Amino acid sequence: MTQSSALSLLKTGANMFITGPAGSGKTHLINEYIKYLQEHGVSVGITASTGIAATHMGGVTIHSWSGMGIRNNFDDRDLEELAEKGYVANRIKDTAVLIIDEVSMLHHFRLDTLNAITKHIRKNDMPFGGLQVVLCGDFFQLPPVSKYGEPDTHFIYRSEAWKEGKFAVCYLSENYRQKDDAHLSILNEIRSGEVSDGAREELKNRYNKRTLTTIVPTRLYTHNADVDAVNDIELGKVSGPETIYEMSSKGKKPLVEALKKSCLAPEMLRLRKGAHVMCVKNNFDKGYVNGTLGTIVSCGFGVDPVIHTAPTPEFPQGRRVTIESASWKIEDDGRVLAEINQYPLRLAWAITVHKSQGMSLDAIEVDLSKSFEPGMGYVALSRVRTLNGLTILGINEAALQVHPEVLEYDRHLRQLSEKAEAVLAGTDNSDIQKAQDEFLAKVAPLYSMGKGKKKKRLGIEKVSTYAKTAKLVRSRVSLGEMANEREMTVETIIAHLEQLVGSVDESEKLSTKDIEYLKYEISSQHFGKIQKALEEVSLKQKDGKPPLLSSVKSKVPANITFKDIRLARVLLGYIGKEHASSGE
């Protein structure tokens, strides 16, 4: 199934399982759906089975989101106690769509627990209490690991909740990572459970074969001890002074600790000029993504001997980028509960296979001689884009194996996906649009089906979150002060401004005159360039909708952020009553 077909089905509100080979764009599709939901003000829970996977998506673990924690059993008393925890209960009640990524590592009994929790708290006997649940993952990748004292562990498709949820299956068929047919063929043979002599010979040819690239390859190991040893040894070989960048944090200690454990950036980032590093967060404005490799060309102290200068790596083709400090947060309805800040880098001579899941790398050296889990070899070999970027240091037979149970079930998933695609192809576009509109009317707080107009939501009268922001604006509070006062991010405050300008609710409504004082938040030089780009894009679109952010970004210098563009777009009147249905 293509990504566009899968996105159309997602928008109808059906429970979905998004799957496909490594590199087929599963996470990209989920991010596109999240963006669509947020544009329409739909409350979405963004979670994953592990902390590492959650940070890739800017979310939290499903264990934390649901309040189930690490408990293996949940009885009626546990459900009642959880329902009394207001912050958990309110989050579950207020959410309309729940995303869970990397579900291959989620225990089947935890999906059943989630089903019980959501039903109980939402007081709704529908599957998952009426939430749309979107699962994403690949059962050929790392499976759930059973710890001592836990029940027998199975994949989630063995759970009762899987059957009850009636998940439509979208098996993505395109590949966006691997660049050569031989490599794809090997990965597909591993997925089929029958690795041919030809494929084994191709892999044998990569034994200790140095990659034909100037990029220093990342070594993948199956065990943490090997990774730490290699990184320490290699850093020790680099001459010159060492700079240590320490992570900062704020918020509730248990949540901060959970963030630290799940974050790929270390608490103490040790760097030297010449150190091999990997970016561990996406920054499209700066031109790097999670997995981008480089060599440090500058770090340490500037003119002030107390203040560190930001590290600067050199990426392939000689491109040098000064890395900005990044934050990882746990948020609840826009409030920041915990936050850590660190430069999104880590030493990259070595990394575990487990932590590499979700990355796309240009060059790797992989030691699979100690592989111990089905799917471990598949995950490692699928991280690299081409065979020319692969060096095998060691491999055992277990590395070429996948879970035998998954082989048969995968055929079933493909059949279900083909059936879903056939139904979609045979459905009139107007009927698909109607289903999408009906779902939005149900879950979007300010969406009126059909007309695409915003209207006040009926319900309990209370001061809305938008009205609280509007009050601060009328007091001419700065963006940063508003974010602190509301315990939200600046981006969330800007989203509120987009909603408030032209609102039909007189208690919330703001005019461009009300917010014009915020123009000083953008440098005059940048503001002029953004204004010109907005005018050009708006004229070209000719549809009356707000100028697309991506189109404007392509017309301004790289150091102008999406945040500034969004703010300027509101200040200049491109967001308002006439544009209320479109958003971006």
Image (tube, rainbow, N blue to C red):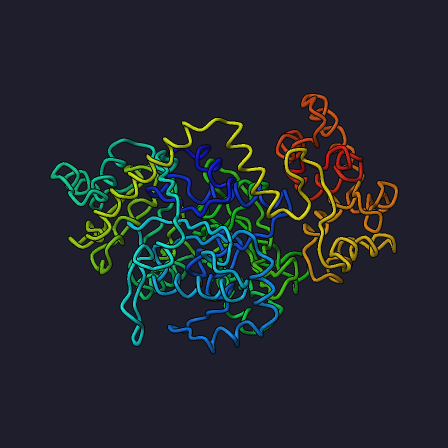
Q: Quadrant of residue 183?
A: top left
Residue 49 drawn above or below residue 537: below
Estimate the x, y position of residue 72 in percent, counting from the top left.
Answer: 37, 72
- Residue 291, how many percent across, how many down? 44, 47
Q: Is residue 526 visible?
A: no
Q: Nearer the viewer, residue 567 or 203?
A: 567
Assign the N terminus to one quadrant of the image: top left
Left or right: 445 with respect to 206? right
- What is the count of numbered marks? 0
In the picture as drawn, the residue positioned furthest to the front comes out as: 125
- From what the image shows, is residue 38 above or below residue 256? above
In the rendered image, which quarter contains the C terminus? top right
Q: Is residue 106 above or below residue 584?
A: below
Residue 27 is left or right of residue 34, and the answer is left
Q: Position of residue 105 (x, y in %)?
A: 35, 58
At 78% across and 55% down in the image, what residue appears?
A: 469
Q: Residue reaching furthest left?
A: 197
Q: Residue at x 40, y 47 (%)?
A: 359
Residue placed most toward the observer, 60 or 528? 60
Rendered location of residue 399, percent (x, y): 21, 52
